[in-house]
Amino acid sequence: MIFLKAFLVGGAICMIGQIVINLTHLTNGKILVLFLIAGAILQGFGLYDKLIEFAGAGASVPISGFGCALVKGAVKAAETEGFWGVLKGGLSATAMGITVAIVSGYIVSVVFTPRTKRK
C-alpha cells in the first residue's frame, strides 16, 4: 500500500507541475523555485511532514521535499544555535543532496560532450 500512496502523491505533484507548464509561460527554473517554496511554506505550517508520513518517497523525493528539508534543518538549528543556525541549518540538512547533485553533474559533463541546443 505504501507504494501506491507514493505513486499517487508523487504523480499528483508531477501532474500539478505539468498543469503549471501548460497553463503558464513560466520557465522550468521558475517552476522549480515555485515548488521548492511551496514545500518550504507547507513545512513552515507543519503540513509537509504529514504528507511525507502518508506518502513516503512520493512526497520527499520531488523538489518540494527539498524545500521541506531546508526549512526543517533551519528550524532545528535555530532552536540550538539561534540566528546563525537559521542561516546554516538548511544547508547542513541538505548538504548530501547538494553534493551528490554537483558531483554527478560534473561526472556527466566529463563523460559526455555538453553543448547548447541549435535553433
Image: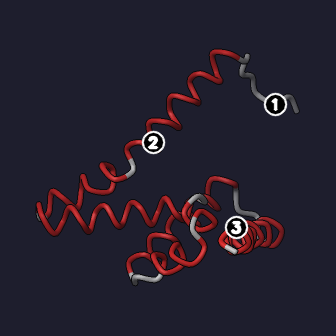
Q: Which mark is residue 84?
A: none
In space, the residues marked 2 and 1 are separated at their CA atoms by: 26 Å
Residue carrying label 2: 98
Q: Is residue 90 left or right of residue 48?
A: left
Q: Is residue 87 left or right of residue 47?
A: left
Residue carrying label 1: 117
Q: Is residue 45 above or below residue 62?
A: below
The coloring applied to the image is secondary structure
Residue shown at 46% from the left, 83% from the top: 47
Q: Residue furthest left?
A: 81
Considering only order in the chain, which callout, 2 or 3, is on the residue closer to the N terminus?
Answer: 3
Q: Please name which of the two marks, 2 or 1, marks the residue nearer to the observer.
A: 2
Of 9 and 89, the residue lying toward us: 9
Considering only order in the chain, which callout, 1 or 2, is on the residue closer to the N terminus?
Answer: 2
Rendering coords of residue 3 (x, y %):
70, 67
Q: Is residue 45 above or below residue 73?
A: below
Of 7 and 88, the residue lying toward us: 7
Residue shown at 53% from the left, 37% from the top: 101
Rendering coords of residue 44 (x, y %):
38, 78
The image quadrant that residue 4 belongs to is: bottom right
**Helix, strand or loop at disc 2?**
helix
Mark 1 Cα within 10 Å, few/some/many (few <14, many 20+)? few
Residue carrying label 3: 3
Q: Please name which of the two marks, 1 or 3, marks the residue nearer to the observer.
A: 3
Considering only order in the chain, which callout, 3 or 1, is on the residue closer to the N terminus?
Answer: 3
- Amino acid type at image mark 3: Phe
Q: Residue furthest right?
A: 119
Q: Image quadrant for the N terminus?
A: bottom right
Rendering coords of residue 74 (x, y %):
28, 63
- Amino acid type at image mark 1: Lys
- Amino acid type at image mark 2: Ile
Residue shown at 34% from the left, 66% from the top: 72
